[in-house]
Amino acid sequence: MDYSKLVGLYEELEKTSARLKKIEAVANILKETKTEILPKVTLLLQGRVFPSWSEKEIGIASKMAAKIIAISTGFPEKDVSRLFRKKGDFGLVAEELTEKRKQRTLFKKHLTVDIVFENLQRLASIEGKGSQDRKFKLVSELMAAAKPKEAKYIIRTVIGDLRIGVAHGILRDAIARAFLSKEDTKAAVSAVEWAWFLMPDYGEIATIAKNKGIKGIRAVSLELGKPYHVLLAERSKGLEEAIEKFERPVFEYKYDGARVIIHKKGSEIWLFTRRLENITKQFPELVELARKHIEPDDCIVEGEIIAKNKKSGKPMPFQILSQRIKRKYNIEKMVKEIPIEVNLFDIVYLNGEVFFDKPMEFRRKILEESVKESKGKFQLAKQLRTKDIKKIKKFYQEALDASQEGLMVKNLDAKYQPGRRVGYWLKVKPVMENLDLVIIGATWGTGKRTGWFGSFMLGCRSGDDFLECGMIGTGIKEKSKEGVTFKKLTKLLKPHIENQKGNQVSIKPKIVVEVAYEEIQKSPNYGSGFALRFPRVICMRPDKGIDEVDSTKKIARLYKQQRGTRF
């Protein structure tokens, strides 16, 4: 297939906001695509060249896009950056400068889907000294052979910003329409979605649907070594509400760590996060613990990794653990610096049998039979079975005193629903007090937010200064008759810009906003020493002056109160 044909579809999808038209357009090209390149086309429609769960990635950040465009078109990098500030989209910049390019190639290579896909996949294997320059050269070769529209989408794919509006639901429905049109529409869509929960790769799913129909789709199951979408918890307003929700509740610590899904096949171990990231290399000691303490040959168990202080053995906050999740080098050093503990709470697969249809009580029993515990290293999650509110409140306080987030409340009679928040699991956490903070910086937006600030740096008061405590973009609307909008904030903040560097601006403290958040974390990246986790704007506070902005001392106090001092 010519890449230009796929680009034509990209253009059509970008101009179309109607969901049904998008589904129809995607379904039509999937039907026309030959089986051997169907997985490639399906991935490219998502702006990817690897499945979402693959540890491989292209590895080129958007800030490098200007250099790539400059190399391939012959324009100075400063001109590329200037045009980007105007357009807010490196794809549009690549398109315009390719049209005007100073370096013309006499004999252009005809771009096909295979050529583009395979060249972009090769980027992931380029490592070592000078790797960035070699990556730039490889992309520049594609760009040199590309027509303006092709260059637009090549650069967008490279930086992970395709902008054609093909989300999960559209691709799901398009596969059902393309290959399962003889079936009941609702049943076909449901079958494709279920397959995606268990096999998060629409390339494989599209191929199965084309070759084997709905029977093949319904036969999709868990596969050891490949991640699946896990069951998620809903937030509850409080313990009383959570208790009333279930006839037979069970309470577990909600650990302040990272969900880990452990696959075991003989001596081989894979570790995945809830976001499908493969973290096997980052946690070699967990691999050894799983080999030693999980007794069945083939199984999949779920748990939570928490970080521990190497001297005191006390739990450490999630952001400490996140250093290990993101680390790709010096792994052995990190193992020594940040030891871990794993608390297991579920089993979904054992020796060929999937337990999604089994109740929670059954799964816990099988888990207990399958794991040989090592206290403080590899153990079962702490659990309480009762409806006695006094005992539950005591257990809740024990979790908080142990520097954990709160409690999970689970239904002992409930099945396991992958990929969904269905009310089988509830989480109960302390409600954090909102903060009044001032905006002290911003980043110019891209795409729909071009011309506006797209994210904002929050500041808290420290004497006469204001120190960073978080970046925010949530709770702000793109278009709204009510509430805070990006346009409104940009208009209010523009007169207070003090200086600008690239797309970053510093802003004189003037505009106060009320902010909600999930928790406060320690952070070496912000001047205050703290970072708000998942902050969101609640409202503007024009009634408050900057002398009323909450202080670093208050944030430190709330940090200590949320679960007790962690260190």
Image (spheres, rainbow, N blue to C red):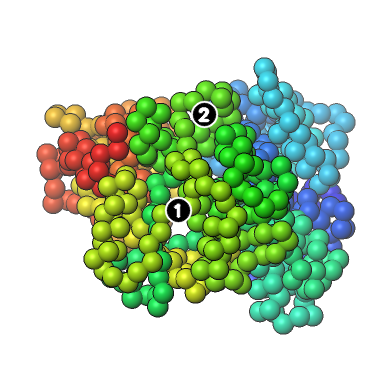
Decide which of tag 2 and tag 1 comes sooner along the chain.
Answer: 2
How many tags in the picture? Answer: 2
| Residue 536 coordinates in the image, percent (x, y) | 33, 52
Question: Residue 347 occupies which quadrant of the picture?
Answer: bottom right
Res 322 seen here = no
Q: Secondary structure at mark 1?
A: loop
| Residue 566 coordinates in the image, percent (x, y) | 30, 38
On the rendered structure, is 319 left or right of 5?
left
Residue visible at 67% across and 65% down in the picture: 354
On the rendered structure, is 415 left or right of 385?
right
| Up-down relation of residue 83 to residue 512 (above or below) | above
Front residue of 427 and 498: 427
Q: Which residue is mark 2?
A: 335
Residue furthest to the bottom: 184
| Up-down relation of residue 500 to residue 419 (above or below) | above
Residue visible at 59% across and 30% down in the picture: 328
Q: Which residue is mark 1?
A: 381
Instruction: Name the amino acid type tagged 2.
Output: Val
Front residue of 381 and 124: 381
| Up-down relation of residue 175 to residue 395 (above or below) | below
Query: Mark 2 to mark 1: distance in Å?
Result: 22 Å
Res 88 seen here = yes
